[in-house]
Structures are given as C-alpha cells and as structure tokens.
Amino acid sequence: MHRSSYDIESRSTELINEFRIIYNEKKITFSLNIPPNTELLYVDPFYFDNCLRNLFDNAIKYSGNEPIITMACTQSEEKTSIIITDNGIGISRNNRKKVFRSFFRSAEAPVVKGHGIGLAFVRQIVKIHGGKLDLQSVPEKGSTFTITLPNKIVKS
C-alpha cells in the first residue's frame, strides 16, 4: 500500500459525478456533510477510491430510479468515520454478515450486475488501513455503511 493524503470531499464528489454519467437514466441525489475543519485522510488513494466506488455503486444499483445517497464525516482526535447512507432495498438481518463474504449473492435482492465480491473487498481494505466497516440496514428503507479509520498511521 502507498498511503498519501486523501481529500475525501473532492474524491467523493468526483466519484459521484462519474456515476451520474454511468447511470444517466437514474436521478441520483447526493448530499455531502463534511465539516470544514476535517483533516485529510492518510490512505492508499487507489484502494480507498475503490472502497467508495463500490459503496456508491451498490447504493445506486439497489435504490431504484431515484437513489438518495448521503455521506457524512465525523472526526475526533483518534478516528475518522465516513458514513454512507442510501434509500435502497436494505439488507435483511439474516444477510447482514453474509454480504461481507466473497461471492455471496442474496436471493432476496433483485438481479443486478456483479460478482458478490465488492463488500468483501471493501471490508478487507478498511481492515488493512487499521479500520472497521459496520453495517446498519432496514429492509425496504435502506442501508448505512460506516467506515471508521484511525487518524494515526497504522503499519501494514
């Protein structure tokens, strides 16, 4: 991994704009809540972009024609949390741990393009950065993924 400064605000906006082009038939609403004094993350930009890309892509794919995605950041002395919420189909209690397994595809979800490796990848990359990935979800209401990263450099 090659860590460097990462501007979560500008990168998230760029990624969402890419998805607006890819999913031009959908009306994507994206809101970003990052306090002005939030410090830059120190992560591997390539891998962290892919984490966000996967979470945004899932939010869009599983939220019908009018995805609403909100992203917020909170920061303390010790950690930074990135909270991504969508208005999608949600994930049942039975599948909340399973979605992080490689190649898992829920029979409850609509058929969408993918291989079932994205969330396993996201969790692994977050873990390598010394962080954790949490999921809260309500079926038919949406999901919230929270990435929590330490602010100090973690040796990999």
Image: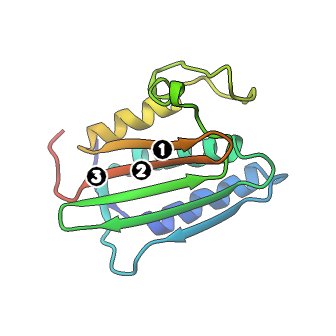
Please, is residue 93 above or below residue 89 in the view?
above
Mark 3 crowdedness (10 Å alpha carbons): few <14, some 14-19, many ≥20: many
Q: Which residue is mark 1?
A: 136
Say whether disc 2 or disc 1 marks the residue closer to the N-terminus: 1
Image-based side of 123 in relation to 94, left or right? left
Q: Nearer the viewer, residue 134 or 14?
A: 134
- Residue plotted at (44% across, 32% down): 121
In the picture, which quadrant includes the C terminus? top left
Taking 60 as reference, is 8 above or below it? below
Q: Which residue is mark 3?
A: 149
Q: Nearer the viewer, residue 133 or 43?
A: 133
* N-terminal-most mark, 1 or 3: 1
Q: Amino acid at mark 2?
A: Thr
Q: Position of residue 141 (x, y in %)?
A: 65, 48
Q: Can you give x and y, in whole percent of width and height, for residue 59 in the image? A: 63, 46
Tell me which residue sits at (27%, 38%) in the image.
128
Question: Residue at label 2?
Answer: 146
Instruction: Name the residue located 46 percent from the left edge and 65 percent from the top edge.
Output: 72
Viewer-side label of 2, 1: 1
**Mark pair 2, 3: CA separation:** 10 Å
Does residue 7 appear in the picture of this structure? no
Q: Position of residue 33 (x, y in %)?
A: 49, 72
Gap in angstroms between the C-alphas marked 2 and 1: 8 Å
Q: If the image is split into quadrants, where does the N terminus sit?
A: top left
The residue carrying pointer 1 sits among few (fewer than 14), some (14 to 19) or many (20 or more) residues within 10 Å by Cα, namely some
Residues under numbered marks 2 and 1 in contact, where contact means CB atoms less than 8 Å apart: yes
Helix, strand or loop at mark 2: strand
